[in-house]
Image (cartoon, rainbow, N blue to C red):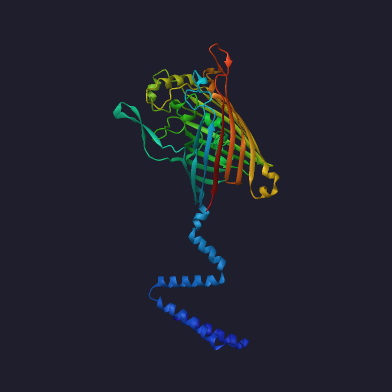
Amino acid sequence: MYRNLLIIFTLLSCITLFAQEQTITLTQQEYQSILQRLEALEANQQKTDATTGATQKTDAVTGATKKIKEEPQELKEQENEKKVPKWIHNRLTIGGYGEIAGKHCFYSNNYLRYGKNPEKYKGDHYGEVDLPHVVLYLGYDFGKGWSMGTEIEFEHGGPEVAIEIEEEEGGEYESEIERGGEVALEQFWLQKKFNDYAIIRAGMQVIPVGALNANHLPTEYFCVYRSEGEFTIIPSTWHEIALTFMGETPWGLSYQAMLMPGLDSDRFNKKNWVKPGAGSPYEFKLANCFAGAARLDYAGVQGLRLSLSGYIGSSFRNTLSMSNKEIDGSAYKDVKGIVGIGSFDFCYDDHNVILRGNATYGHLTDAAAITQYNMGMRKGSVSSKQQVASDALAAGIEAGYDFFSLNSGLHNKGHRFYVFGRYEYYDSMFMNNGRRDYSYSWCGRHRASAGINYYPIKEVGVKAEFFYGILNKGKNASGDLVKLYNDEPGIAIGIVYAGFFRP
């Protein structure tokens, strides 16, 4: 209180001296206004002498009122920061991607259409609509190089199902809906960044082998659905619990090296090769054997990215169907089931042209032994009990041109209109133990497509596509290579989005 009286006395003295020096005349009204303001300040101080907290609150309100008059723009920014805390602006990342798609296929979807009498299904057609992938992303930067990321995926509206072995029921496989929802955790990782060259990440994350896994957002490919080739023969989007070492250099080279559990050969099959062996149908991921993956990306030339990726790991012992002791004492003791995958892909995006291409080749050792083993698994097991090839491949190329680049008004507003074409070939039964096997020629096909992509804004696109699939020739009863299966044409449309931002 005495401190404030001293301040008031000092102010009055300064006014008096200033007035004497400058010969300033104050009207009675102005003088009364100054006294009223000083008395109000003294009253506020006296009201809050007993409680320090109340004094602080009054001072804060007074200060805010003063800033409204003197700094309205600064106050507006501060009020916005109160609505969205500063830590959210700096550290939280929110985003996601998704697809709304539909297609009409001018061929049959009967599971026997590749059987002994495919002509029976000629002329059939069917349509479908789908939400192939709807993904929500949430990331947070803890500071000091520590961060986390999560992706929760809603895929095809299918529930999460777990398979258990019931010891009380003779070891039978039993399928149960454990979570009763349509949600799958696609990514959850924690990472420590030491610098740009050295980052360590651990947890559920995408395995970036092939073009599609590393670039799986719907705005990163032209077709309505993900390209069939890599999507058929290797997992997509391939995610595993892994330990990753990664980094990037100033000259455009980045790397990833990963350690993770191996694939499970129980679930390999003829249509999808090793794709079903990823993840786990159980409530845990088997880790009886391990695998490694790596990727190199070079982006040192404007608009161009060149990438090499690969995977290698054992798969046969990563199973619950037989213990290691049983395997060691059986005919399968030397079976490893090593999966090797090599891939090259590129993207050129400049001068209003996008050109992408990929080539992926895979090899599985002991394919014949794994086929024999899977065929002998008991009824109700996780195995599809099918033949699996020793070699599979997928290759494709696509190109698109932005015709809105010819109109400066539309182009400057961010509108894009690509007309594209794509061709690919893939075969999940390309080689069987070193030789071509024509028993499953329908597993290999050529696929051509053409269409449009319209982007009114960068994050949202509308797609339309016409596609045509031609299946490989097969051997007839006389042993001649002839066309056995119907062609597979169709049309598809979709609306896609992909956006990552900080609020």
Q: Is residue 88 above or below residue 422?
A: below
Image quarter in which the N terminus is found: bottom left
When the figure is inspected, residue 144 is found, relative to residue 54, above or below; the finding is above
Say whether residue 331 is visible.
yes
- The x, y position of residue 408, in whole percent, is 70, 48
Q: How many numbered circles are shown?
A: 0
Is residue 6 visible in this depiction of the protein? no
To which quarter of the image does residue 224 belong? top right
Q: Is residue 207 left or right of residue 287?
A: right
At a point 55% along the width and 72% down the height, the residue shown is: 69
Foreground pick, 110 / 441 = 110
Residue 481, position in %: x, y?
Answer: 58, 15
Frontmost residue, 411 versus 282: 411
- Taking the spot 58% from the left edge, 39% from the top edge, the residue there is 463
Residue 162 in the image, given as x and y percentages of width and height: 38, 34
Q: Residue at x 31, y 29 (%)?
A: 167
Residue projecting furthest to the left: 168
Residue 184 placement, left or right of 309: left
Q: Horizontal and vertical percent for residue 30?
A: 55, 85
Q: Quadrant of residue 27?
A: bottom right
Residue lying furthest top: 478
> Is 373 situated above or below 155?
above
